[in-house]
Image: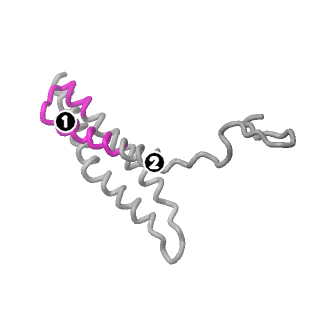
Amino acid sequence: MGEIRTAWATVVLALCAVGLLLVVPFLVLLGFLASIPVFGEAGHGAGGYLTWAAVLGAGLPLVGVVVSATTRRRGWTWFFGICLTVAAAVAVLAWADDVRHALPPPPGPRHCVERSGGGNDCPGG
């Protein structure tokens, strides 16, 4: 029974490595090519490719770390751990870029401004 479990772990780790090293970069390339406007038309198909690349880019190393750590394969654990760390760093940088490019607060008074004539511009009032 242990040999079958070891064989399955080897197959899962190999598939995760192939997917991480070949499929994810291929999906990123397809997403990049789909985002390039062709003959004046904006490409809208990039989102799907890049979403799958992000999901696989984070999910495959996570599966690889779990399987390799539970089967005590040190080299594979290091490989997938480093890949997972890179994926986490890219996610944090993307999040920071989204936060930096967030919409500015709406213009207008942020406090009560008394006006002569009885009116005021109090937010919410």
Q: Residue furthest right?
A: 117
Q: Residue at x 21, y 39 (%)?
A: 82
Residue with the mark numbered 2: 100
Drawn side of residue 79 relative to residue 29, left or right: left
**Dot 1 crowding, Cα within 10 Å, few <14, some 14–19, many 20+:** some
22 in relation to 4, above or below: below
Residue with the mark numbered 1: 10
Q: Quadrant of residue 74?
A: top left
Magenta stretch: give its range: 65-91
Rendered-image quadrant of the N terminus: top left
Q: Amino acid at mark 1?
A: Thr
Q: Please give the label number shown on residue 103.
A: none
- Could you say which is closer to the camera, residue 73 or residue 87? 87
- Could you say which is closer to the camera, residue 124 or residue 8? 124
69 in relation to 91, above or below: above
Where in the figure is residue 86, as x and y percent of width and height?
27, 43
**Total tally of numbered discs in the picture:** 2
Where in the figure is residue 12, as x and y percent of width and height?
25, 37
Drawn side of residue 34 relative to residue 62, left or right: right
Residue 3, magenta (yes or no): no
Q: Residue furthest top?
A: 1
Where in the figure is residue 77, as x and y percent of width and height?
18, 33
